[in-house]
Amino acid sequence: MTGVELVEGGVPAPHPDVLECDELRVWYGTPRGPVRAVDGVSFSIGRGESLGLVGESGCGKSTLGRGIVGLLPAGTGVDGEVRFEGRNLVGLTQSELRELRGPGIGLIFQEPMTRLNPLMRISHHFAETIRAHEPSAGKKEIRTRSLEALRGMGIPPTRFEQYPHEFSGGMRQRIMIALVLVLKPALVIADEPTTALDVLVEAQILEILADLRRNFDTALLLITHNLGIIAEACDRVAVMYAGRIAEIGEARTVFVEPAHPYTQALLASTISLRTTELRFIPGAPPDLSDPPPGCRFHPRCEHAMQQCRRNEPIDMATTAGRVACWLHGPDIGQSAADREPLQREEIASADEA
Amino acid sequence: MPTKPDVAADQSAAPPADALIEVADLKVHFALRGGILGRLAGRSAGAVKAVDGVSFALGRGEVLGLVGESGSGKTTLSRALLGLVPATSGTIRYDGRDITNLSEHAMRPLRSKMQMVFQDPHAALNPSMDIATAVAHPLRIHGVAKDRAEIDRRVRAALDRVGLSPPDQYLTKYPGDLSGGQKQRAVLARAIMLGPELLVADEPVSMLDMSVRAKILDLMMELRRDLGLTYVYITHDLATAKFFCDTIAIMYLGRIVEIGPAEQIYAAPQHPYTKALLAAIPEPDPTRGVPRNLPRGEIPDAVTPPLGCSFHPRCPVAFDRCGWEGRDLRILLEQHWLELPVEQFTAERAVIGELEGLDRPATDVLLPAATGHTGAEVAALLQEVRDVHPDDPFWLGVAETETLSEGLRVRFHGGTDPALYVTPVEHVRAACLLYGS
Amino acid sequence: MVANAGAVEQVVGAPRGGGVLRRTLGPIRDARGLPKVLLWVGGLLFLVFVIFAIFAPLVAPYGFDQTESGNKQFPKYGHPSGSHWFGTNVTNHDVLSIVIYGARTALEVVVLAVLFSIIIGVVLGLISGYYGGWLDRILVLIMDALFAFPYLLLAIVVAFLLAGKVGGGVMTAALSITVVYVPQYFRVVRNSVLSAKQESYVEAARALGARPRTIMGRYLFGNVIQSVPVIATLNAADALLTLAGLGFLGYGIQPGDAAEWGYELSRAVTDAGAGIWWTGLFPGLAIVLLVVGLTLVGEGLNDILNPVLRRRFGRLVVMPARPRSQEVAGDLGAGQ
């Protein structure tokens, strides 16, 4: 991460952090009451850095991704700050956000098949995208930039005039990524970009995403449920559970020495070629309209203490970054009784996922 | 916590005496409907060869893994096994009896013995039926138990068996109220209601979260043990397959390209495609970076597959007999142009004429010169292309070139379509010309 | 993961499956805003006419073909007055009573017609979509031909052919209109079946060994008739206009059998030139109001039930202030 650098001549340097989330909360309104999908999330992404956001279904990670760019249903409550290159996005109008999406923040979604207009040639897609944000761009410039972007994705220039249905799923996802990158955004948010794809195609896409910072100097927020993907493509990882960040830090360190029990359990339950035992986490993620008191993971945690049921844990620094878990302190204010192991109720089979 | 079950000591290639399923040279081709003129002229517009000559045998209590990407034909094969899709040729035997293309009527009583678990738990349950009705439905369909109390008892037992307990809590729920893992459990409950022998599981866990996958796989293993089930497990994820399967068959474009005991396949993969699949699996190990030697390109068109070995256009170790043809030339050129800046691409492209002529499966093709250019220029261009990557396996396949005035004639070595050859690894066979001819 | 995209859906009150009734009534109950207003206004209008229809003898001052009361003859072309709120027409009938009894006729015919259309259209659509093949091709051909025919002409032809053969003007009119609208239901249901056929749960039913009739009845039916309520209401509005058209042209209901707004309008055409406005205005207004009412209900239902159009009715959320971390730490330090 770069610090603030002053360039000669007094021109202000670009903001060191591309994205800063500060106590972001996103609550949906439902007939049953508010659903606290994102409930106090703070993190930052530096220039050209890639952060992987991992969690199970229902932990709020997709909501976080959409909440950053304001793609939320009407009536959703948003609180906190999201600073993109220093500018707070919370509270901006839809049209201001629209200007930002594209040249500022690029979005890659899960289903590439449905995001391309089947009636438009690829060249037309690019022309439309570029002109929407740079109306003065000339035809030749558009063509050159588009072919360059496609080249970076491994799409041959001879196919520039074809229609989306003439490409396979993996190629369409690569075209989507090219469409996003042709505008040279500072940040790309990718929400489960490879979940619908086969393993070889997935590896190709991951290769592209991993090289983003080198080839395009773009920061990446990669949202997924697969820890393996994050290990391969991201510098840092944030583990999300029930709307909060449980642990965040350097990927290398977190994977080797996970600090939060949930991270440990997730790693243990990931099935890879080296798995010899099937491990799973008992119970199921909580209902976000009525989360458990104190630490939200305590009903499923092996190491839960009395303290965990009463108070929400405080963020503590670790070698990799930070973790929110009473196992890591602070010790001030905790009595011996607080540290007594919690007798977890036998998790009824009915609560199993 | 459950560990991998022991693999049977000797898995010979000959079909086991008590094979539950035997498939011999099965083909499933879907005819394409051509344009109006084509239909009027009586021309068939070709067929999608979804399954193109598959043979294997599965013993009782075994688990066969069918591994492949989309387009490999594994899904079609699974449907064909259950008679949900008609077979174009070949035979399927269930417990010794030929069930290929049996009428629905004759097939119905067999259906209680062969059941299916689907990939998308959100779509596999009827949204307008509650769980009690959905799980009980097999009983009603086959008229097995008429008494309501009996049906109720059996439904509760099944729900208990799959971990949806207490059953009372689930009987009145609708699929929309359940999580992915719970839905998949309900699907399993429905599948075991009639006491089947064979369970065909089509990607049962790929749409579930990691931690839930382990639970469902564990459940499936329990059911195998307690109910003596035989499984055909279809997936594109070799990691879960390693855990669950005794035998693995890797599929590519409608054929089995490698088959053998799971232990051997993972320890020493023989086919280049298998090696690529194994290398591409994401590992939660940040020291490992993304694998960089992925096979180029993608699964080709199943209507006119590549000549010779269908994997040859993407294979890093292909050689002269693998079936090189004109379409590979086009791919080579496009790959080359990918690496050039736009102006250079435009300049080179101008030398060559229409590339459409290369899109046929032919071993003797003409790379045409554009108007205003000669065959000699084309030859020179191709030589430049070769000089950039002289080690590309493609050049091993080119037998000779001849410079003509209208372009460059390229002739390739003829290719052989590999069968499943025996490999140096015991009991493993691979469809690769490295091991036979 | 499908679950993720669905997570937002599920959270914000999308229908959660269940029986047909549950999936229809649920969203209606939860609806807010413009669609709800549409539903209420339309529903109210519709209700008024339903009351007219059912309680006609009680509500109407006179019978629809009554020409005298007590010993007094009704005037010809009587102006709207205390005893005849809407005046009288050329044959000495009370216009108000005609309007009220006309509601009964209209609703009888339209309800019958829509019911028949639904039954025939849905069943044929299910069979055609499920089996495909030559049966499907023939049915589609027939339905497309019917659909392409100008609807009024078609209704007239059928009314003409059926005249006298089927009992009563009401049944004739109902059947003529049925023929016009069957193709709509057929098409919609057939298309839904074609796409639902691909779903895993239908495949699962086949793998279980279910017979086609079970698959169509239990698995497909509940899931393909979602658009039917909307179409039915919009259809009813249209059918009403067709009925009025038939009546206007003199086909369908004969004046002696029942009161019919369209027929009244046809007679009122010449009256207008003579300055007699009440014989045409009131029946015409009745048609307009009932059609508008049905259309509003239909559009309101469409906005609510149609998953493509449905707006996410997220309730506005008020968030409590977030406790700052330092305060919590302070509490801990002080409390323990």
Image (cartoon, rainbow, N blue to C red):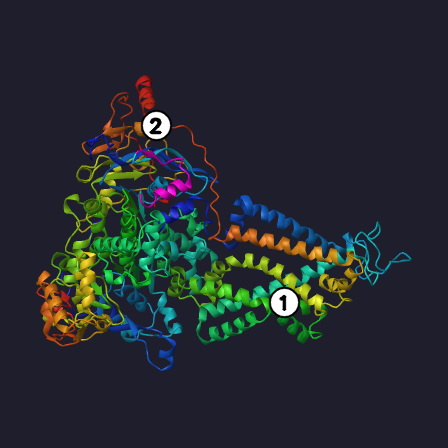
Q: Are marks 2 and 1 on the same chain?
A: no
- Look at mark 1 in the image and give the residue it sits on: C177
Magenta residues, start to end: A86-103
Instruction: Quadrant for residue A8, please give it.
Output: top left
Task: Find the residue positioned furthest to the front.
Answer: B372
Image-based side of A318 in relation to C328, left or right:
left
Q: Nearer the viewer, residue A277 or A179?
A: A179
Residue type beneath disc 1: Ile
Q: Quadrant of the N terminus of chain A?
A: top left
Q: Position of residue C134 (x, y in %)?
A: 46, 76
Residue C313 located left or right of residue B231: right
Cα separation, mark 2 vs mark 1, equals 69 Å
Q: Is residue B173 magenta?
A: no
Q: Chain of mark 1?
A: C
- Residue A96 counted in the magenta span: yes
Judged from the image, the secondary structure of the residue bearing numbered disc 2 is helix
Q: Label 2: which residue?
A: A310
